[in-house]
């Protein structure tokens, strides 16, 4: 994988873990076995503990998208569950235990990507009652605030916000939150949003779908604002086109998935909206998270 693709893949919250996984064997589970006998199966590689994307209870938006695709293909969904950490693609998609990974960057080299089905962005997350407002990495106030940022590791394949802050010399006041987190707890990457609500940090830079889902679930009102710029020159993107991934060479399945993505555009948009996914590929107001309950 090239450095550019490594940074891209590593940048996306839970998707960062696609290049990076538990030593246990993958588990498979039927979602909708057919009582009428054998039928087509759509085998999905997914994380069992990673909302808003997926979980073992099929509550994530990628679970809902997988079900939509399966219905269109007249198939049943069977999951291979594996934590999206080191070795995820190697031990699932490339091992042949499943055929589709939901939610990969279009430029993700280990897989053959479909057409994108949404484009999202990193966002700044603040408490609404704090009166802190940040929209740009160049805002001088970032030098005086406690800043939370998602981290992958110390091997140079960190998230774009971590690189952007370091390039501006904003280091001493930055607190890192691993996208891996404590896997014994539900949805480990969500801790960075919890930290803003709890006042551990004044502002956090978070992958949009994660922030859009968990911000409204906090006990205090949070506000999210898309980061600026969208690309930090010469090439450090904060906005990504998200696709489904299949094994390289499986052009037939990719073509089928592309067909579903074209035909079911409205239904897909509805699912993403229900999970408050910030979008940069559609005209929409700035995402503001309301008080959770």
Image (cartoon, helix red, strand yellow):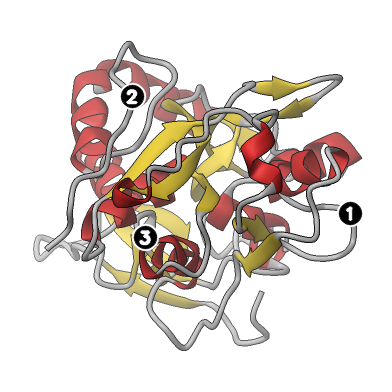
Q: Looking at the image, do the residues carrying marks 2 and 3 touch, with CB atoms under 8 Å apart?
A: no
Residue 248 placement: quadrant:
top right
The residue sitting at 26% across, 17% down in the picture is: 263
Residue under numbered circle 3: 54
Q: Residues within 10 Å of mark 3 (few under 14, many from 20)?
A: many
Residue 156 circle label: 1
Real-space Cα distance between discs 1 and 2?
32 Å
144 vs 258, left or right, is right
Quarter of the rendering occupied by the C terminus: bottom left
Dots 1, 2 in contact, CB < 8 A: no
In whole angstroms, how far apart are the C-alphas of marks 2 and 3? Answer: 25 Å
Provide residue 133's location: percent of width, then percent of height. 45, 36
Badge 2 marks a residue whose secondary structure is loop
Residue 27 locus on image (x, y percent): 46, 79
Viewer-proximal residue among 246 and 193: 193
Question: Against 66, is 226 above or below?
Answer: above
């Amino acid at each position: 994988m090239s450095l550019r693709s490594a940074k891209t893949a590593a940048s996306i919250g839970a998707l960062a873990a696609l290049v990076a996984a538990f030593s246990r064997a993958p588990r498979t589970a039927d979602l909708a076995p057919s009582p009428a006998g054998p039928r087509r199966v759509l085998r999905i590689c997914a994380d069992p503990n990673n909302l808003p994307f997926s979980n073992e209870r099929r509550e994530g938006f990628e679970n809902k998208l997988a079900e939509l695709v399966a219905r269109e293909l007249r198939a049943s969904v069977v999951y291979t569950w594996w934590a999206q950490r080191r070795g995820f693609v190697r031990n699932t998609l490339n091992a042949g235990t499943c055929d589709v990974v939901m939610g990969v960057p279009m430029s993700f080299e280990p897989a053959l990507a479909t057409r994108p089905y949404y484009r999202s962005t990193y966002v700044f997350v603040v408490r609404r009652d704090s009166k802190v407002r940040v929209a740009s990495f160049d805002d001088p106030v970032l030098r005086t605030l406690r800043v939370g940022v998602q981290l992958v590791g110390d091997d140079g394949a960190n998230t774009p916000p971590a690189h952007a802050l370091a390039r501006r010399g904003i280091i001493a006041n930055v607190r890192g939150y691993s996208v891996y987190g404590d896997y014994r707890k539900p949805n480990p990457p969500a801790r960075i949003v919890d930290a803003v609500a709890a006042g551990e940090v004044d502002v956090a830079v978070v992958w949009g779908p994660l922030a859009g889902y968990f911000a409204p679930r906090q006990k205090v009102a949070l506000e999210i604002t898309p980061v600026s710029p969208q690309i930090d020159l010469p090439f450090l993107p904060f906005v990504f086109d998200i696709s489904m991934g299949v094994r390289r060479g499986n052009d037939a399945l990719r073509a089928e998935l592309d067909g579903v993505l074209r035909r079911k555009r409205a239904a897909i948009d509805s699912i993403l909206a229900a999970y408050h996914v910030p979008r940069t590929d559609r005209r929409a107001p700035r995402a503001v998270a309301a008080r959770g309950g």
